[in-house]
Image (tube, rainbow, N blue to C red):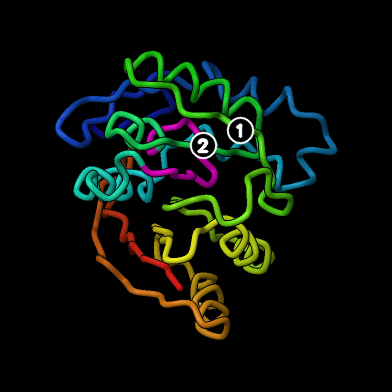
Amino acid sequence: MTQLSEYTPRLEVPLCGRTWTLDRAADLETLWESMVEDDLDNDERLPYWVELWPSSLVLGEHLFAHKDEIAGKCCLDIGCGLGLTAIVASWLGAQVIAMDYEFEALRFARKNAALNNVPQPVWTLMDWRFPAVRPQSVDVMWGGDIMYETRFVEPVLEFLDHCLVPGGRAWVAEPNRNVYNEFKAQLDKRGWKSRKLLTEKTTAIYEQPSKVTVNLWELSR
């Protein structure tokens, strides 16, 4: 992928043997300015969704490599952002529910599915603290770079417990953040199996001196 030197409203992302077109907010500065002051004081409302994080690229390739394990299955994308991994999974035949905390993220994600001519996932505005899916109804879950605050550890663990069918799996990609160690410790404490599938150095979408290290984990009971 050609690295960017500045923000652009359209991304062309080579992944899984094809190129994906992703649209996002045309003007990042205007997006920031449109947020009310109260929201800027609350980092839950920061527009992280406008970026394509390296963890999503690793997750997308993993979904492609394991397409037989998700085809026809009920899958949940946690924090879908611009929609890349949800769109890839839908293209591969998964029945995808894609959730995000921000409506604008879902609006662009839906547009991006149409741009790439794949079946629309079920785009859902959801807070993982208040699950809006049936208990034990999801076969496979995944999330890219979702564990970046210690306060997320407990609600994400409870969300996994709520959503996954017995024997279900979650795939989590993370860029070597220290907070993941706390998350893993709590997984172990609760009897989850946590297996590192790979560690990969991947290219970020913006120019930077070195590649980003991403770990991919599989979580199961």
Q: Amino acid at mark 2?
A: Ala
Q: Residue, x 37% and y 14% (percent of image)?
A: 115
Residue 83 inside the magenta-drawn segment: yes
Q: Residues within 10 Å of mark 2 (few under 14, many from 20)?
A: many
Count of marks overlaid on the render:
2
Disc 2, SS: strand
Q: Are marks 1 and 2 in contact (CB under 8 Å)?
A: yes
Which quarter of the rendered picture does the N terminus lie within? top left
Q: Amino acid at mark 1?
A: Thr
Disc 1, SS: strand
> Quadrant location of residue 12?
top left
Residue 150 in the image: above or below residue 32: below
Q: Position of residue 96 (x, y in %)?
A: 44, 36
Q: Position of residue 140 (x, y in %)?
A: 42, 52
Give the residue at the far bottom of this rendering.
189
Q: Nearer the viewer, residue 81 or 160?
A: 160
Q: Residues within 10 Å of mark 1 (few under 14, many from 20)?
A: some
Task: Look at the image and give the residue range highlighted in magenta.
Answer: 73-85
Q: Residue 124 has which mark?
A: 1
Q: Residue, x 66% and y 51% (percent of image)?
A: 128
Q: Is residue 106 left or right of residue 10?
A: right
Q: Is residue 10 left or right of residue 128?
A: left
Q: Position of residue 39 (x, y in %)?
A: 79, 38
Q: Residue 63 has which mark?
A: none
Q: Position of residue 89 (x, y in %)?
A: 34, 37
Q: Residue, x 71% and y 40% (percent of image)?
A: 45
Residue 178 in the image: above or below residue 111: below
Tell me the residue that label 2 is attached to.
98
Residue 53 in the image: above or below residue 216: above
From mark 1 to mark 2, how far is it between C-alphas?
Answer: 6 Å
